[in-house]
Amino acid sequence: MFDKLDKMWIGTLLGLVSPITVLIFFYLANYTHISFYSFLSKYMEHKALVPLFSLCAIINLGLFYLFIQKDKYYAARGIIFSTLIYAIIIFAYKLS
């Protein structure tokens, strides 16, 4: 099954979707009494949105380790690429 997953675009897609999924699970676990938009604006107001996104991107570390252990190096490259995309977005947000 893992043989089909050794493609860079699959790793990139997983690396982009997994932090968003973690953010949604965090919202559902802690803030279901308010809307998702209010949740995001609350974190923006307290200047905690960037650290929250950074913590959500840590899931990519586990995915990277999983693909390295299974010798799926192209998918691991995709995970690194998507993590760099998140890093650039977070850095640009911090500069603005």
Image (cartoon, grey):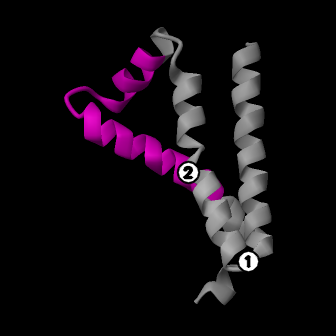
Residue occupying the point 37% across, 40% down:
26
Find residue 8 and report its horizontal and vertical position in percent.
77, 69
Q: Which of 9/80 is in front?
A: 80
Image: 45 above or below 73: above
Label 1 sits on what residue type?
Lys
Q: Position of residue 25 (x, y in %)?
A: 36, 46
Using the image, tell me which numbered label, if any, was put on residue 72: 1
Could you tell whether 66 is left or right of 45 in the image?
right
* Disc 2, SS: helix
Residue positioned most to the top = 45
Q: Which mark is residue 59?
A: 2
Task: Report the span colored magenta.
Answer: 15-43
Q: Amino acid at mark 2?
A: Ile
Query: Residue drawn at (73%, 77%), measured in percent from left and top?
Result: 72
Relative height, residue 62 to residue 43 (above, below): below
Q: Position of residue 85 (x, y in %)?
A: 75, 43
Q: Per the image, is 42 magenta?
A: yes
Q: Quadrant of residue 6?
A: bottom right
Residue at figure coordinates x 51%, y 18% from the top left? 48
Say which mark, if any, is on residue 4. none
Horizontally, residue 73 falls left or right of residue 54, namely: right
Mark earlier in primary sequence (1, 2): 2
* Disc 1: CA contacts within 10 A as few (<14), some (14-19) or many (>=20): many
Q: Is 93 displayed left or right of 81 in the figure? A: left
